[in-house]
Amino acid sequence: MDDLKSSPKSVEMIAMLADFYIQNNLIEQAIELLKISLGETKEFIPLYIKLIEAYLIKGKEDEARNILEKALIIDRDNEKLGDFSKRLYKEKIETVTEPELTLETEEKEGEEISKIKSILKEINEDEKILGSLLIDETGLLIAEDLKITIDVEGTSAMIAAIFSEVNDVIKKIKLGSFEYMFFDFPKGRLFSFMHSPLIFIILCSKDIEFGFPIIKGKEAFEKLKKNLGF
């Protein structure tokens, strides 16, 4: 996310992804994503707003106030920040509505996640595909469907780090962007597709036809992006 400051569209996508996390009760993931993003760009108010919302849902009012103060330095006239100021600095703080939203979300828990997992299950129907994961570019897991046991956290972090390094190199030598990467291992293959801030990973057996996961992966990734609004 090194170019967030010069790429408003990328930052908007991250705000949308954070909102997706919040709507699906993945509050800790939203907080982590937003904190990392704000480390790269400190001028995009929607990121502050989403982080304040996430902290309020978790009941962390002190953290919410801290973020609010930083945001007000940038835009003191923002209407949404003004609403947060009234809520957080009243002598008697009223019960916020976000926890109620969380309870409502639980009734249809994972409705969006279920849609994503159904796409993952569809591509995993082929016996030579061993599983798939959808992560964000910081390495945080969004959804997975695996037939084998792997270190999900470690794999996600590794792929995210590799994509970050490759992106830096590509930008420096001005080759544009790439559609996918693959890794050939003694016992299998790994294919990865990226559209910031999303990374889609497919794990395959060694004897799979090379073109199959690329075609299927692109099709599935388009569906995933559409479901997430990218």
Image (cartoon, rainbow, N blue to C red):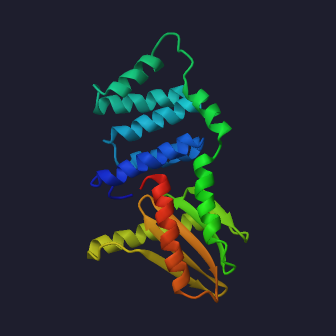
The residue that appears at 62% across and 59% down in the rendered structure is 117
Does residue 59 appear anywhere in the picture?
Answer: no
The picture places residue 25, in percent across and down from the top left corner, at: 60, 41
Task: Please identify the quadrant where the C terminus is shown.
Answer: bottom left
Q: Check the image and report above or below for 49 versus 217.
A: above
Relative to 36, residue 104 above or below: above
Residue 67 sits in quarter: top left
Q: Position of residue 222 (x, y in %)?
A: 46, 65
Between residues 107 and 73, which one lies in front from this camera angle? Answer: 107
Placement of the N terminus among the 4 image quadrants: bottom left
The number of numbered badges drawn on the structure is: 0
Q: Position of residue 122 (x, y in %)?
A: 63, 68
Q: Quadrant of residue 97?
A: top right
Quarter residue 149 falls in? bottom right
Which residue: 60% across, 28% down?
A: 99
Q: Residue at x 30, y 50 (%)?
A: 8
Q: Residue lying at the far top in this picture: please name it.
A: 91
Residue 2 image offset from top left, x and y in percent? 35, 58
Q: Nearer the viewer, residue 35 or 99?
A: 99
Residue 26 can be seen in this image: yes
In the shown orientation, is residue 185 left or right of residue 211? right
**Residue at 63 percent of width and 53 percent of height:** 114
As drawn, 64 above or below 165: above
